[in-house]
C-alpha cells in the first residue's frame, strides 16, 4: 500500500480554502498512485481555532466541507482528514475532534480523539467530548490504528502534566491494528523533535508496529508548527522524515524496502531561528494586510536579531528600521543600527525623539515640579519611541515587531506602550542568552558579521538614563536565565530552584517575585512566538491581582499558629 | 441545627491570610452557637487561582492550610470549606476541587466537585479531576447533600453550553440527603440573581428539599462576585438572602419558622453600577500598590461615568482627572470635565497636548511628506494623551482607568497605546446604550445632574479630526448594540441575527467582520470588569490571525464545487 503523509498548512477559519486544498492534494495523490492520503488533525479548520468552534456557522461550514470532500473522493484512494464532527448525544460536549476516513462510494467514517489536552496552550476539553475506545479501520486488507495527537502521548516518561486513565494505543493494538497512524496539530518547541523520536521509537518497539504521523505545519499567531511528520518502521527506525516548517508530502510504500535515516543532528539554535522566521512570515502572509515590517533599532542585540529574522522572513525590501536616539543614547546606538541595515540591505531612517521628550517635559513641568526624575521620565522616552513607530506603522501599513526577549518580559524590564508597542513579539519566548546564540548563529551562517560585533559585545542597556546598564537592575543573564528557566519552563518553585542551582535563596525569591508582579505588563503584551514548552501568553495564565507570600509552607503554618495564640 | 453561610471574600493566592480569616469566622460562629459554618468554593486559595495551581508550592500551602484549619476547629461546630486536595490516583488530573468537612477530633472529610465548567471564563478541567458520585455527610442527625457550584447547574433549561452525563444532585438525594448545600465561586453577571432564583426554586421543588448556597464575594481582577448567598425552603421560597458585593454571614436555624422574603426587584443598571464599583475598589485594595485613580476626561459620557464610579469606589480625594484638549476638541470637552470634577469633588488638571502633537508632526514631517492626514495623525493625538496619563501615573503611582465601552472595544473604535492605555478597563463590558443608562441612574440617585447633562446629550465623538462624530463610522448605538449583543453574548451568527432583528444583512456582516478583525487590539487591552455572561477577555478566545469568509454555508459549498469544475 502507498501511503501519502500530507504535512499540511491550514489557515485558521478558512474552511473553504483549506477544503479546496485538501481536495487538490488528494487528487494529486491519485495521479501518483497513492492508496491512502493522511492529513493532520483539524486540517479543515486549522489549529488553534479557539472559540470559533462556539459558532454554529463555523461548525456548519466544517460539516459541509466534510460532506463535500466525501463527494469529491476519486475512486481507488482513501483519505484521513483531521476535522470536527457534532456529538449526537444530548449530554457531553457538543463536538468531537475527529479523523474523517473518506472513500468514494462509501459513507464517511469518523475516528474520535480520546485524550484531550487541557493544559498549557491547549483547551481541548473546552470544545470536545473525549471519545471511548475506537476501532481500527480495515482498508485494502490492512488494519489501520488511527488516532489523534495526544492519544499517543500517554506514557509516564513523556507526560508532563498527568496521565489519562485509558490507553488509546493499547486498545487499537488489542483490536488488531497492523499499523499506527497519528494525525497531529502538535506545535514546535525546541527539543520536541528529539522527544518525538524517543516517544515514537518507544511506541514502535512496545507494539512491534510501524508508525505514521502527519502533523500540521506553518504558524498561526503564537503557535509555530515545524511539522516533523514521519514514518517509522516497526523497529522504531525512521524511514521517511519531512522537512521542517514547510508543506511537504511523504509517500511510503509499505511493500518497499527503506534504509533507516540517520538521526538528525540536534541544533537547538537553528531550530529556534527557523521557527521564528516561519512565525514572522506566516503572521504577515495569513493576516494579509501588511506592506512590510517595521523595527525600532537601538543598536543592541535584541533589535539586531529581530531585524535579521525579519529580513530572512520577508526579504530586505519589506523591512524598514528606525533609529530613535535620545540624549542618553550612545553614538553606537545609531552607528551600529546603520551598519546593521547596510549589512542586511534594508532601509534605515533616523528620527531623534528629542522634540517629543522636550514637549512632554514642558507639558508636565507644572505637575512634576519638585519631584526627582525617575521611572516616569525614563518611560516618556520609551513611549515617544513607541508612538513614533506606531505612527509610521499606521501611515505606511507596516507591522511593528517588538524586540523584547523572554528574560526582560519575565522581569518586567520593558515599558508598556513604549518598547512593548507592536503587533508581534518575535523574541518574547527567547531568553537573552539564547538571543546571543541566535546572533552568533546568524553571523556564522553568513560567514561574516552581518550583526555588528559591537552590538553583540556591548553591555546591554536600555539607555533611558545616563550610563544605565541592564546589570544595574538585573543579575547577570546567565544566572537570571537559569533561574527563569527553572521557574517558568520547568515550573519549579523557590526551594527547588535553590536546591538545583545553589544560588542565594534571597536572589531566587527576588526574581520570582519580580516575575509574579509583572504579569500586568505581559497581559497587555503583543502575542509572542512560542518556541519553548512554556511561553508567556495563552499557555501561562497567572492572576493579575493576587498576593503570594512566598514564605515556606513551614513558615506559613508557624505564622498562622502564632497569630492565633496572640 | 444552626447553619451559618459565610459569604467570604478571599484574596487569590493569599493562603495564610485566607485561612486565618476562615478560622476567625469559625470561632466567631462558635460564640454565636452555630453548628455548621459553610464557606464558598475554593475559599483557601481564591477564585480564580488560574495556573497558580500548577505550582507545587501553592498546593503544599493549601494542604497545610487544610490541616491547620482542622487542628483549629473548636468543639461542637463543623465547617465546610472550599479548598483543593491532591488526587492520590496515578492517573487523571492531579487535583480535586474540594469541600473540606472539618470537625474537631475527627479526621477531615473531603467532598469532590463532579462537574467542572470548562467554557467561557472557566478552565476547571485544566486543573481538576472530575469526581464520581459523592456521599452525603451525616452530621448531628442531618444528612447534608454537599456539592460544589457547577454540580447544581446541570438542567436543560439552565445549561448554556452543554449538559453533563451525570446527575450530582439526583445522586445525593437518592442517597438520602435531607438538605442540599452548595459551595460556589460563581461570578456576577447581570440577570444572574434572577436566574439563580429560578434554578434553586426548581431544585427545591424537584426534590422537596431546602437549599443553602455560600458564594464567594468581592472581585479578583476581571471577575466580580456579588455573593448572592441564600437559604431556600423546601418549597423554593427564599428564607435568607445576603447583601450584594459585601462580606456577610447568614445564620439559619433549621428549627425556626421564617417568613419567605419578597423577590428582590430587578434593577439591571443598579446591579451593573454596584458590580463596577466593587471591581474598581477591589482591584486597588487587593493590588495594594496604588495611591489613587487617574482618568483622562474628554467631556464625553464614558469618561464621566468612569470617574463617577471611581469616586464611588475610593472617594473623591483618591481620584484625579486630566483634560487633554487638542485643536479638534470642542470647548465643551474641557468645560464639561471641569464641571464633572467640581460636582464630584475630585481634582482636575488641564494639560494641552498641542506641544507633543506638534513635536511628532515635525519629527515625522520628512517621512510623511506628500501623504494625506489620516489615521496615523489621529492616533498621534490619542497616544499623546495616553503617554501623558501614563507619565502622571508613573510619577504619582495612580492607576489609570481606561474609559472605552464594550461597543467601542467590539468595533475596534479605540487607539492602542492611546485611549486604551491603563490598568483597568472599567466599561469594557458595558455597551454604550448601558453607559447612558448608568449616567442617568447616577444622576437620578443623586437627585441632581452630577454628570453634566451636556455630556449625556452631546453626540458622541472621538474629536480626533474636525467635526468628527462616532456616527461617521458606526451605526446608531441602538442598532449596533442590538447586533453586538446577539453576536457576542448570545453567540448567534449573521443569518440568525438578521432573522432576529430584520436588519440589513450587509450591515450585520460588516459589523461582525469589524468585531473579528479587531481582536488584535483587544489582545493588548487592559483587563475589563466582567458584568455580562460573555465579556471580552479570558472568557472569549478568538484567533488573531485567521480568515473567515462569512459567506453562507450554501454559498461556500457552491463556490467549492464550481472551483473544481474549472
Image (cartoon, coloured by chain):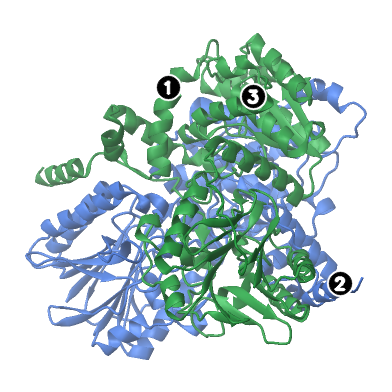
Chain colours: A blue, B green
Q: Residue at x 65, y 66 (%)?
A: B39
Say if A163 sits above or below B300 in the image: below
Q: Residue at x 53, y 53 (%)?
A: A529
Chain under disc 1: B
Q: Which residue is mark 1?
A: B476
Question: What percent of the width, then of the height, locates residue B274?
Answer: 63, 40
Q: Earlier in the sequence, mark 1 or mark 3?
A: 3
Q: Residues within 10 Å of mark 1 (few under 14, many from 20)?
A: few
Q: Is residue A101 visible?
A: yes
Q: Which residue is mark 2?
A: A564
Question: What percent of the width, then of the height, locates residue A486?
Answer: 67, 70
Relative to A336, A40 lies left or right: left
Quadrant containing the C terminus of chain A is bottom right
- Label 1 element class: loop
Q: Which residue is mark 3?
A: B443
Relative to A258, A192 lies left or right: right
Amino acid at each position: 500500500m502507498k501511503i501519502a503523509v500530507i504535512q499540511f498548512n491550514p489557515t485558521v477559519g478558512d474552511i473553504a480554502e483549506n477544503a479546496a486544498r485538501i481536495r487538490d492534494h488528494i487528487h494529486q495523490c491519485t495521479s501518483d498512485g497513492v492508496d491512502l492520503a493522511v492529513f493532520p488533525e483539524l486540517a479543515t479548520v486549522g489549529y488553534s481555532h479557539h472559540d470559533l468552534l462556539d459558532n454554529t456557522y463555523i461548525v456548519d461550514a466544517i460539516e459541509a466541507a466534510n460532506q463535500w470532500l466525501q463527494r469529491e473522493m476519486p475512486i481507488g484512494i482513501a483519505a484521513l482528514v483531521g476535522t470536527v464532527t457534532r456529538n449526537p448525544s444530548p449530554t457531553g460536549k457538543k463536538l468531537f475532534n475527529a479523523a474523517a476516513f473518506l472513500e468514494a462510494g462509501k459513507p464517511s467514517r469518523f475516528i474520535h480523539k480520546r485524550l484531550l489536552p487541557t493544559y498549557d496552550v491547549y483547551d481541548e476539553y473546552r470544545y470536545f467530548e473525549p471519545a471511548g475506545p475506537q476501532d481500527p479501520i480495515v482498508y485494502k486488507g490492512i488494519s489501520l490504528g488511527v488516532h489523534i495527537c495526544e492519544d499517543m502521548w500517554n506514557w509516564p516518561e513523556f507526560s508532563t502534566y498527568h496521565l489519562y486513565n485509558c490507553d488509546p494505543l493499547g486498545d487499537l493494538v488489542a483490536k488488531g491494528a497492523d499499523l499506527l497512524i497519528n494525525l497531529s496539530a502538535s506545535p514546535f518547541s525546541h527539543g520536541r523533535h528529539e522527544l518525538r523520536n524517543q516517544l515514537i521509537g518507544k511506541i514502535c518497539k512496545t507494539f512491534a508496529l510501524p508508525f505514521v504521523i502527519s502533523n500540521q505545519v506553518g504558524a498561526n499567531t503564537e503557535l509555530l508548527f515545524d511539522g516533523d511528520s514521519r514514518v517509522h518502521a516497526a523497529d522504531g527506525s525512521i524511514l521517511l522524515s519531512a522537512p521542517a516548517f514547510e508543506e511537504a508530502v511523504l509517500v511510503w510504500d509499505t511493500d518497499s524496502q527503506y534504509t533507516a535515516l540517520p538521526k538528525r543532528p540536534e541544533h537547538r539554535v537553528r531550530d529556534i531561528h527557523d521557527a521564528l522566521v516561519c512565525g514572522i512570515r506566516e503572521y504577515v502572509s495569513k493576516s494579509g494586510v501588511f506592506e512590510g515590517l517595521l523595527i525600532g533599532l537601538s543598536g543592541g542585540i535584541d533589535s539586531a536579531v529581530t531585524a535579521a529574522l525579519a529580513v530572512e522572513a520577508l526579504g530586505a525590501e519589506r523591512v524598514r528600521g528606525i533609529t530613535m536616539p535620545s540624549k542618553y543614547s550612545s553614538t553606537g546606538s545609531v552607528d551600529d543600527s546603520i551598519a546593521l541595515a547596510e549589512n542586511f540591505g534594508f532601509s534605515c531612517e533616523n528620527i531623534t525623539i528629542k522634540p517629543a521628550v522636550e514637549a512632554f517635559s514642558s507639558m508636565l513641568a507644572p505637575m512634576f515640579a519638585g519631584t526627582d526624575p525617575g521611572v516616569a521620565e525614563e518611560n516618556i522616552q520609551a513611549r515617544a519611541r513607541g508612538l513614533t513607530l506606531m505612527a509610521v506603522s499606521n501611515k505606511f501599513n507596516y507591522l511593528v515587531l517588538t524586540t523584547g526577549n523572554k528574560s526582560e518580559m519575565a522581569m518586567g524590564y520593558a515599558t508598556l506602550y513604549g518598547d512593548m508597542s507592536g503587533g508581534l513579539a518575535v523574541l518574547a519566548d527567547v531568553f537573552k542568552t539564547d538571543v546571543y546564540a541566535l546572533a552568533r548563529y546568524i553571523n556564522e551562517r553568513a560567514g561574516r558579521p552581518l550583526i555588528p560585533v559591537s552590538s553583540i559585545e556591548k553591555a546591554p542597556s536600555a539607555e533611558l538614563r545616563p550610563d544605565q546598564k541592564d546589570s544595574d537592575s538585573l543579575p547577570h543573564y546567565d544566572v537570571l536565565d537559569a533561574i527563569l528557566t527553572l521557574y517558568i519552563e520547568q515550573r519549579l518553585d523557590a526551594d527547588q530552584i535553590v536546591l538545583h542551582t545553589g544560588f542565594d535563596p534571597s536572589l531566587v525569591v527576588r526574581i520570582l517575585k519580580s516575575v509574579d508582579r509583572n504579569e500586568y505588563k505581559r497581559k497587555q503584551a503583543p502575542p509572542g512566538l512560542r518556541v519553548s514548552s512554556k511561553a508567556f501568553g495563552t499557555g501561562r495564565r497567572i492572576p493579575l491581582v493576587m498576593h503570594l507570600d512566598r514564605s515556606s509552607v513551614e513558615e506559613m503554618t508557624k505564622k498562622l499558629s502564632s497569630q492565633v495564640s496572640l
